[in-house]
Image (cartoon, rainbow, N blue to C red):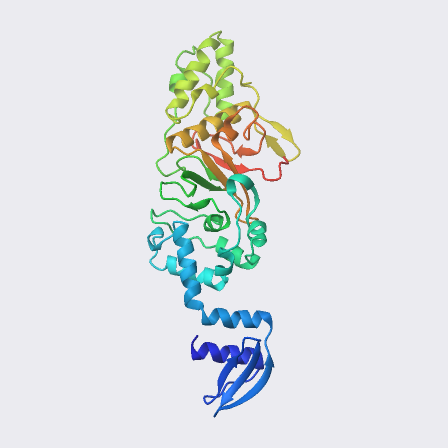
């Protein structure tokens, strides 16, 4: 503890300044004295909080060592971030939160909890909620050049079975990749960053009178319109195979069996209040998009987090794709598909209300 730190601490407790000839002494029974020329002057006592502050300042080197050891156990090192100061800033942030006291607390497993609010969980484990919010907002650039998402580092520090990923993806649960998405996250290349050009040429080929699609923006509406042309020309048996082939260029790793005869191709959505529930076509496209992404990147575990509330929900690939699963039940919702947005925004419906 430096002389400057001692002086600040003395002033905060006594309201006066420590002279150069005085020494500031705090006994184990939390009594404070000054010593000058072998004479002691009793000033009073300190609170438990003040005593803990003094103890921590004296042992700050040991605290920093504990924090760094814990970060290493969570697979965070100076090489985890692109900025040369980011790791140091993270340690300083945790040191300011008296994080070494939180390290020893028992923490839950994400595989058990699966959903909830990160701040609520860290608070139950002894981390100050204000400091937890600050950690959640620490979003440096990782070593690959990608932004670390809000709450991502806090997730690794909150759950016993979560760590920074060393195998791709954002985090790991045990040895398995965990992909973290914020609300509005996409499962695929964003528009304007090399996305795939889409065309209906293969699908329209057998039609004698193909419909005019120039004024239609929605991919779902276009597919429905083309479907009805196949029905009217009596060649509906060709529609599903050709639609699958058309979509395969954009979702080559996806299971095309999600495009099937069970889909109501005239169901474009149902209005409920101010919202429109996704219709059959959008849900099928959402499954195909999600399956393509998860298969391409060999990821089976996903987590959505709201950067404002820090609510979160973790789920497996099968939970999203199965009949009656998250997509079918409108818990994992995609925005609309279009020719220019083949990988739309997805949101998790945390409250379950539409």
Q: How many marks?
A: 0
For residue 349, side relative to residue 245 (left or right): right
Quadrant of the snapshot with the N terminus:
bottom left
Could you say which is closer to the camera, residue 43 or residue 17? 43
Could you say which is closer to the camera, residue 17 or residue 335? 17
Q: Look at the image and tell me whether residue 217 can be seen.
A: no
Q: Taking 332 as reference, is 137 above or below it?
A: below
Q: Residue furthest top?
A: 234
Q: Position of residue 14 (x, y in %)?
A: 57, 81
Q: Position of residue 49 (x, y in %)?
A: 58, 69
Residue 170 sits in which quadrant?
top left
Q: Residue furthest right?
A: 273
Q: Residue furthest front?
A: 28
Report the residue at 51% width, 19% height from top: 225
Report the residue at 50% width, 82% height from top: 24
Q: Look at the image and tell me whether residue 263 can be seen.
A: yes
Q: Position of residue 228 (x, y in %)?
A: 52, 14
Report the residue at 60% width, 73% height from top: 47
Q: Position of residue 101 (x, y in %)?
A: 51, 60
Q: Residue furthest bottom?
A: 37
Report the residue at 57% width, 28% height from top: 278
Q: Taking 269 as reference, is 107 above or below it?
A: below
Could you say which is closer to the camera, residue 69 or residue 5? 69
Quadrant of the snapshot with the C terminus:
top right
């Amino acid at each position: 503890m430096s002389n400057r730190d001692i002086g600040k601490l003395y002033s905060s407790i006594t309201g006066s300044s420590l002279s150069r000839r005085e020494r500031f002494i705090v006994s184990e029974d939390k009594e404070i004295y000054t010593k000058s020329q072998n004479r002691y002057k009793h000033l009073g006592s300190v609170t438990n909080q003040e005593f803990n502050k003094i103890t921590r300042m004296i042992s700050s080197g040991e605290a920093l060592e504990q924090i760094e050891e814990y970060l290493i156990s969570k697979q965070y090192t100076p090489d985890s971030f692109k900025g040369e100061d980011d790791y140091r800033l993270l340690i300083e942030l945790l040191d300011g939160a008296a994080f070494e006291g939180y390290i020893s607390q028992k923490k839950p497993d994400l595989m058990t909890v699966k959903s909830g609010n990160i701040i609520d969980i860290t608070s139950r484990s002894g981390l100050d909620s204000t400091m937890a919010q600050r950690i959640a907002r620490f979003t440096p650039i990782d070593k690959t050049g990608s932004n670390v998402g809000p709450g991502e580092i806090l997730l690794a520090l909150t759950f016993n079975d979560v760590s920074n990923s060393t195998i791709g993806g954002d985090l790991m649960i045990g040895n398995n990749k965990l992909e973290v998405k914020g609300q509005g996250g996409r499962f695929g290349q964003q528009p304007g960053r090399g996305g795939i050009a889409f065309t209906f040429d293969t699908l329209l080929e057998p039609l004698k009178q193909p419909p005019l699609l120039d004024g239609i923006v929605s991919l779902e509406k276009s597919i429905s319109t083309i479907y009805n042309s196949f029905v009217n020309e009596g060649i509906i048996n060709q529609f599903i195979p050709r639609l699958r082939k058309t979509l395969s260029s954009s979702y080559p790793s996806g299971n095309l069996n999600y495009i099937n005869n069970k889909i109501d191709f005239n169901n474009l959505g149902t209005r409920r209040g101010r919202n429109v529930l996704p219709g059959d076509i959008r849900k099928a496209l959402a499954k195909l998009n999600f399956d393509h992404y998860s298969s391409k990147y060999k990821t089976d575990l996903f987590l959505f987090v709201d950067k404002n509330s820090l609510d979160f929900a973790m789920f497996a690939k099968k939970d999203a794709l199965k009949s009656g699963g998250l997509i079918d039940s409108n818990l994992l919702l995609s925005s609309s598909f279009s020719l220019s947005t083949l990988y739309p925004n997805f949101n998790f419906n945390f409250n379950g209300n539409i």
